[in-house]
Image (cartoon, rainbow, N blue to C red):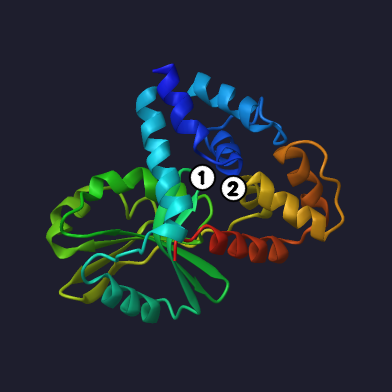
Amino acid sequence: MALQKVDYYSSMNTAFLRELAEGINLSFRFHGDKNKDALLRILQRKLDAEKMGIVFKLYLTCFEAKDIVQVIKPKGMSEIVEKLESFFSASEYLHEVTVGLRRCDLVFFSADHINAIEVKSALDKPKRALDQLEYYKKWANKVYLAYDVQHNKTVKRLTLKENGVGLIQFSNGRIQLINEATFQEQNKVSLFSLMTYNYLRKIARNFGISLKGGKQAISKRLDNVVTESEAKAFFRDFLRTRALI
């Protein structure tokens, strides 16, 4: 299995491996400037063969697909997107946005809000969305589950309303707001923690901040000079770089 891991990981680029190290919470030993060989050794100690396969699929989807694969939206998705865009009075929307090791179906920017939406079609299972929705709360102001009407009974049994998740039901292209999401203010420290090491370095350069140390060190310096509104703007730009389309 060790050889298989090396073969898989060796085909991934260093930037992705670095983000993977950040995403699985290796910050206690990871300081950002390690080369590819060092990153491979760290990750091979932490991920078994099954997890390695999942990560490799994520790499192919999120990093390679931008250039070599035409994204085909699920049937009816375009119509749903248009209606949600109107519902949120959105100035912009992003599709398939990867933050950490979670990928959000749709992100809508409206005024000063970031809305994260997980879409569950008739072929999906809403129960699998619970962990995803909780993760989106780390960076989105409002989190929604948009689901096909046939999942109505299943969704009612989930504790989504109690946890501040908004519910949007769709049927034959029509959408209906079942429950409004609770607004969550995000602070700059939490937003910095979700950005990649390379992106934080990019921001630091803009402010003439030292690039020494790892992600945590750079975040701490940025916290002293970047305002809350600037951090939110930077995070929106970061999300744009993480969107498939």
User: In this rendering, would 134 be left or right of 78?
Assistant: right
Query: Secondary structure under badge 1?
Result: loop
Marker disc for residue 180: none
Q: Which residue is mark 2?
A: 194
Q: Between marks 1 and 2, how big is the CA–CA gap?
A: 7 Å
Residue 177, located in which quarter of the rendered image?
bottom left
Residue nearer the viewer, 220 or 6: 6
Query: Secondary structure under badge 2?
Result: helix
Amino acid on which the number 1 mark rests in the picture: Gly
Q: Looking at the picture, how far across and down is residue 149, in whole percent?
A: 15, 64
User: In this rendering, would 113 be left or right of 102?
Assistant: right
Marker disc for residue 100: 1
Question: Within 10 angstroms of label 2, few (less than 14), some, or many (20 or more) residues?
Answer: some
Q: Please say if the residues under marks 1 and 2 sit with CB atoms less than 8 Å apart.
A: yes
Q: Looking at the picture, how far across and down is residue 2, in whole percent?
A: 44, 17
Q: Is residue 202 above or below residue 127?
A: below
Of marks 1 and 2, which one's residue comes earlier in the chain? 1
Look at the image and tell me whether residue 41 can be seen: yes
Q: Looking at the picture, how far across and down is residue 93, in whole percent?
A: 45, 72
Q: Residue at x 81, y 55 (%)?
A: 205
Amino acid on which the number 2 mark rests in the picture: Leu
Residue nearer the viewer, 53 or 221: 53
Q: Looking at the picture, how far across and down is residue 64, in whole percent?
A: 46, 52
The quadrant of the picture occupied by the N terminus is top left
Residue nearer the viewer, 93 or 164: 93
User: In this rendering, would 53 be left or right of 183?
Assistant: left
Q: Is residue 105 above or below residue 47?
A: below
The quadrant of the picture occupied by the C terminus is bottom left
Residue 197, located in which quarter of the rendered image?
top right
Q: Residue at x 21, y 53 (%)?
A: 155
Question: Within 10 angstroms of label 1, few (less than 14), some, or many (20 or more) residues?
Answer: some
